[in-house]
Structure formats: structure tokens, C-alpha cells
Amino acid sequence: MSGTQQRRWHVYPNRDALVERAAAAIARIADAAIACHGNFNIVLAGGETPRAIYARLARLDADWSRWRVYFGDERLAPAHHPSRNSTMAWKEWLHACPAIEVHPILTEHGLAQAAHDYAVILNGVRFDLVLLGLGEDGHTASLFDTMAAHTNADVIAVRNAPKPPPERVSLTPRSLSRAENVLFIVAGQGKREAVTRWRAGEMLPAAVVCPSNGVDILVDGEAYGQTS
Ligand code: 6PG
């Protein structure tokens, strides 16, 4: 984890272009990781923005047996509940690619147990790619303030999230920052204020993910403030 966040902005005219280019970037990183390591470890983002990207990945022609899927955060909800980030990924993509090795965060076991168990699962796992979203308040994963930047834990329980549900499990900046590649996926007018604050250098929760290779932020014109 480096000190300051190096950011590379990639602005696309609309959400469809963003989806296509994000899926292409994921496929490219996957091919490189498989060529180098024999497999590809990806940490998925939650929320709604990545939904269309996951649906697009389902149409890729890939050797899915080389792919291992993890999650950057998960909400407290019963297994397979529609509000869970893992359920969305399953519905849009993973159900169609059964060869993929999937590691959900089992929040149904309780927050503390799920955080502990996931840290054990992640121990020693190389992150080739971490996907992250951006909230309208500048949060990412389930990191709603910058306090988690000071923890040595890799996975934490979150009990006061302002975005429902309040109870979640999240990877920490320390964990997310060990990734070889970090792609933020940001779209829509509602994210413009957070993007503007981020570009101005404000220390948002999204700004404390500081991998050594920097972060790539794939954003549409609406969120970036560049409407043609
Ligand atoms: C969640 C996500 C969260 C999400 C952002 C953006 O559990 O909701 O982990 O961090 O990525 O809130 O959400 P949208 O893509 O729905 O705007």
C-alpha cells in the first residue's frame, strides 16, 4: 500500500461504452494473470453499477476453470437473499459459468465470524484485480469513512453503514491495496459530486485504496461532468 493514491481517469461517453470497455479490461487482465500464474483472482464490487458488466462477462469466451471470484464486501442478509452482492453476481454471471471457483462472504454466520473466516480464506491469496464502486458520498466497498485505513485487519465488520443495510462485512484499504490492478467503475449523474470531490483531492473513503500500481477509474461522462 503506497502513501498517496495515483489515479488514472478513463472517461467514456455513456454507460454502454463504459460496460464494454470495463469488460474488455477485465478480460485483458485475466489473460495476463493466467499467462503468468495459471489462474486469475478477481475481487468483485457490489451495488448496481457492475450488474451490466457481470452480464457482459457471462458472454465472454474464457477458460472459467482458471478464474477465482472473491467479494470486496457483503451485506448482512440470508444466503442467496436478493440484496446480497454475491446474489447479484450469481444471477448476472456466475450461474452461467459453473467452472468458476466462487468464494462468497458468509454473512449469514454473523458479522464477526464472517469477517474472521473470510480473512482466513483470503490469507495468501494474490489479488490480480479488485473491482470497486463509488457511492454518492464517496464510499467504496463498505468503507464509509477513512477510519479503516488505520486497521491492520484485512476484513472488518461494519455495523453503522449509512447505506442500507447498516450491517456488512468489508475488505479494508490494507487488503484492497494489495491488488495488482484496481478498477473503479463509476456511472451516472448521482456520482458527479463524489467524483468532483475525489478529483479535487478530498480524502474520501475511495481515496484511501492505494495500490502500488495506482488505480484506474472508469467513469461515464455523466459522473465525470462531461456531457456532450
Ligand atoms: C454495496 C457496494 C457499494 C457500492 C456503491 C455504489 O454493497 O452497495 O459494495 O460500495 O459499490 O455504493 O453502488 P451503486 O453501484 O449501486 O451506485
Image: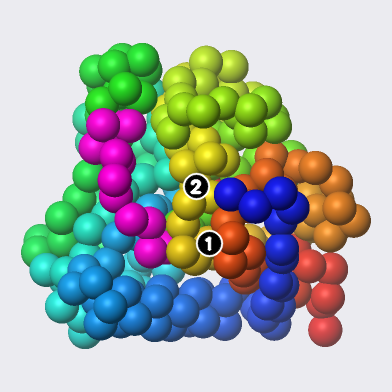
Q: Residue at x 46, y 57 (%)?
A: 179
Coordinates of residue 31 in the picture (x, y in percent) = 30, 81
Q: Residue at x 68, y 77 (%)?
A: 10
Neighbourhood count class around disc 2 (C-alpha, 10 Å): few under 14, some 14–19, many 20 upward: many
Neighbourhood count class around disc 1 (C-alpha, 10 Å): few under 14, some 14–19, many 20 upward: many
Mark 1 lies on residue: 182
Relative to the observer, which residue lies in front, 119 or 65? 119
Q: Are marks 1 and 2 in contact (CB under 8 Å)?
A: yes
Which type of secondary structure does the marked residue at label 2 adopt? helix
Dot 1 or dot 2: first in sequence order is 2
Q: Is residue 93 above or below residue 10?
A: above
From which residue to which does the magenta span run?
A: 118-129
CA distance separating discs 1 and 2: 8 Å
* Side of 82 relative to 47 (left or right): left
* Side of 73 relative to 63 (left or right): right
Type of the residue with mark 2: Leu
Q: Is residue 54 above or below residue 38?
A: above
User: Is residue 176 something one can see in this rendering?
Assistant: yes
Mark 2 lies on residue: 176
- Residue 113 colored in magenta in the image: no
* Side of 143 relative to 102 (left or right): right
User: Is residue 190 something one can see in this rendering?
Assistant: no
Coordinates of residue 40 in the picture (x, y in percent) = 27, 67
Q: Residue at x 53, y 40 (%)?
A: 174
Quadrant of the rendered structure where residue 154 is?
A: top left
Ligand 1 closer than 8 Å to the CB at disc 1? no
Quadrant of the rendered structure where residue 116 is?
A: top left
Type of the residue with mark 1: Val
Coordinates of residue 160 in the picture (x, y in percent) = 59, 17
